[in-house]
Amino acid sequence: MTPAAEHRIETAHVRRTPRYTVFLGAGAALGILAAVVLTFAFNGTENVSASTGVSYSTSQVFGFVCLFAIPVGVAIGGAIALILDRSLSRRAREVRVDREVITVDDVE
């Protein structure tokens, strides 16, 4: 076995990027919070619906509002992450990297 090493100096771009899952999760949490606020801010659960003739409970109203608020919150969180990613890409810097590749010939 004779190991062979190869050294090269290369350049690489280093920049910070946001964690998209964190921003999407925060957007979903913001959507749930908005659904809670909208559910309890307007007391429409006591009245019978004019279009369906049914009275909805508070939890049903919360579920219906969540169907719209959570996707909107996720979209807002994703948009904020994209804006941050674009602004942080301008601060990218170039560094020199020493790359070493070692190959071992295994003869049996």
Image (tube, rainbow, N blue to C red):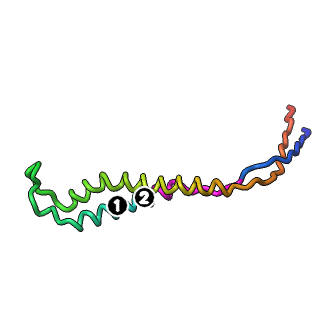
**Residue that badge 1 annotates:** 32
Q: Amino acid at mark 2?
A: Gly
Q: Quadrant of the N terminus?
A: top right
Identify the element where label 1 is drawn.
helix
Q: Is residue 15 magenta?
A: yes
Q: Which residue is mark 2?
A: 27
**Above or below: residue 52 compared with residue 103:** below
Q: Position of residue 56 (x, y in %)?
A: 15, 57
Q: Residue at x 47, y 53 (%)?
A: 78
Kind of residue sitting beneath label 1: Ile
Who is closer to the viewer here, 80 or 1? 80
Q: Is 19 in the magenta?
A: yes
Q: Which mark is residue 56?
A: none
Measured as percent of width and height from the top left, residue 50 is found at 9, 52
3D distance between C-alphas at marks 2 and 1: 9 Å
User: Of marks 2 and 1, which one's residue comes earlier in the chain?
Assistant: 2
Q: Quadrant of the C terminus?
A: top right
99 versus 40 height, above or below: above
Q: x, y (%) of residue 24? A: 46, 55
Q: In the image, what residue occupies the spot 20% across and 65% down?
A: 42
Q: Is 62 left, or right, of 27 in this rendering? A: left
Report the residue that reaches farthest toward the right.
2
- Seen at 39% across and 56% down, the residue is 73
Seen from this angle, which residue lies furthest top? Answer: 108
Classify 102 as above or below 50: above
Q: Residues within 10 Å of mark 2 (few under 14, many from 20)?
A: many
- Find residue 28 and report its horizontal and vertical position in percent: 40, 57
Pick the front one: 62 or 105: 62
Q: In the figure, 36 relative to 21: above or below?
A: below
The boundaries of the magenta stretch are: 14-25
In this orientation, which residue lies closer to the viewer: 1 or 81?
81
